[in-house]
Image (tube, helix red, strand yellow):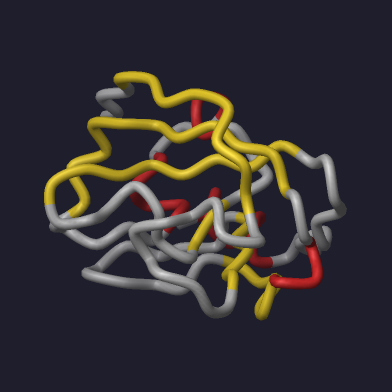
Amino acid sequence: LAKSERLWNTPVAAPHDGDAAFRLWGGGSGSGGGSWSGVDPSTMSSTREMLGLPNVNTMDNLSLGVITDASQVQHVRHALPLDGMPGGGAEWVFRGGDPLDFAVGRVTLVDVVFAVRP
């Protein structure tokens, strides 16, 4: 909880075109959902807790992308608490588009890597 509290007390920077974006997904969470982060999850301890990931997200994959239209970001915020996870990590929530097609006016995929996270 102390880590989460520090994150909640740190402002979340808005993204700009060309910024790196990261999304952990798997199981019941798809590759192209609207929530991305500007923070590489490999630099986080307690990733699930800090990003407030739902229990259905198995975090098997990590999508690496580049922001192509930052104006499509609807919310710049801290990841919300969910399923008992405290949240607090940086989160960018994109508007519109098909949640399975993340490239539509938002993020261009660079790579997807296998990323089993603790």
18 vs 37: above or below: above
- Using the image as rendered, state which of residue 74 and residue 108 is in the foreground: 108
Residue 111 left/right relative to 29: right
In percent of the image, x 48 and y 65: which residue is there?
34
Count the numbered circles shown.
0
Residue 52, image x, y percentages? 38, 61
Q: Position of residue 35 (x, y in %)?
A: 49, 62
Q: Residue at horizontal 66%, vertical 55%?
A: 6
Residue at image location 64% in from the left, 66% down from the top: 8
Is residue 4 positioned above or below 80 on the image?
above
The residue under the point 55% across, 36% down is 109
The x, y position of residue 56, in whole percent, is: 14, 57
Q: Position of residue 7 (x, y in %)?
A: 64, 56
The N terminus lies in quadrant? bottom left
Observer-nearest of 101 and 61? 101
Could you tell me which quadrant the C terminus lies in?
top left
Residues 115 and 18: in front is: 18
